[in-house]
């Protein structure tokens, strides 16, 4: 009898943990409006993100032969500054842009060790600030239309939450 009760309790505990693990990220995003990856204090960094948005749009519009739609971030150990790379080449950036890039990289994406800003992508009139693991992006939409994504895998769900005009959190589950 005691053995049966212990087995039932263990099964109940495992079931509870499984349900919690599956529901928690979705609950956190929908009801609380956050994920563990998102930019925590967007308002504090909005101007820095806007500087990066304007630069990215101008940079891609000036490229004749686009190799890709992403600018990657690097780090210069000598200057202790983050750098922008496109097609294997370092992009020259202004001091103002450098300050904004450093603030965004050092302060906006530090909530979780998995939320390192990895690339800035430009496609379909939207600029996306994407993290290493692909689970989150902050998106600026020039036309203020909600970003939509087509994923080949039916198991991946994309959740979009508008922060303010033109700005969206994108969370991939």
Image (tube, grey):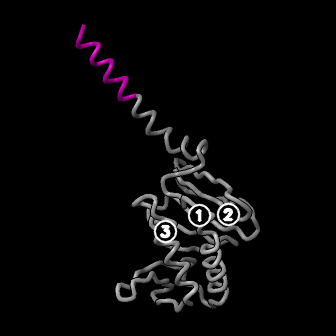
4, 115: nearer the viewer: 115
Start-end of magenta stretch = 1-15
In which quadrant will I find the N terminus?
Answer: top left
Label 3 packing within 10 angstroms: few (<14), some (14-19), many (20+)? some
Whether residue 56 is situated above or below residue 169 in the rendered picture: below
Residue drawn 45% across and 35% down? Answer: 20
- Residue 50 point in image, percent of width and height: 65, 74
Residue 99 x %, y %: 53, 81
The residue lying at 36 percent from left, 26 percent from top is 13
| Residue identified by numbered label 3 | 107
> Label 1 vs label 3: CA separation?
15 Å
Q: Is the magenta stretch mostly helix, strand or loop?
A: helix
Q: Which mark is residue 138?
A: 1
Q: Which residue lies at the image location 46% right of the left edge and 71% below the top edge?
A: 106
Q: Would you name the residue on which mark 2 appears?
A: 167
In primary-sequence order, the first of circles 2 and 3 is: 3
Q: For the view shown, which residue lies furthest in the front direction?
A: 44
Q: Distance between the residues labelled 1 and 2?
A: 7 Å
Q: Label 2 near label 1: C-beta < 8 Å? A: yes
Q: Is mark 2 on a helix, strand or loop?
A: strand
Q: Quadrant of residue 171?
A: bottom right
What kind of element bears circle 3? helix
Structural distance between the alpha carbons of marks 2 and 3: 18 Å
Residue 173, image x and y in percent? 51, 50
Query: Looking at the picture, does residue 39 appear above or below residue 126?
Result: above
Q: Is 57 contained in the magenta span?
A: no
> Which one is closest to the eye, mark 1 or mark 3?
3
């Amino acid at each position: 009898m005691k053995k049966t009760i212990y087995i039932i309790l263990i099964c109940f505990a495992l079931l509870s943990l499984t349900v919690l693990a599956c529901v928690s990220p979705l609950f956190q995003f929908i009801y609380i409006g956050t994920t563990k990856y998102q930019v925590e204090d967007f308002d504090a960094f909005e101007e820095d993100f806007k500087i990066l948005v304007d630069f990215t749009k101008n940079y891609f519009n000036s490229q004749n032969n686009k190799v890709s739609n992403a600018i990657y971030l690097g780090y210069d150990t000598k200057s202790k500054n983050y750098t922008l790379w496109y097609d294997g080449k370092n992009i020259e950036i202004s001091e103002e842009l450098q300050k904004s890039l450093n603030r965004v990289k050092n302060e906006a994406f530090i909530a979780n060790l998995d939320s390192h800003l990895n690339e800035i992508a430009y496609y379909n009139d939207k600029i996306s600030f994407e993290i290493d693991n692909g689970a989150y992006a902050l998106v600026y939409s020039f036309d203020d239309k909600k970003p939509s994504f087509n994923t080949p895998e039916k198991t991946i769900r994309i959740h979009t939450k508008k922060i303010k005009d033109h700005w969206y959190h994108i969370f991939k589950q």
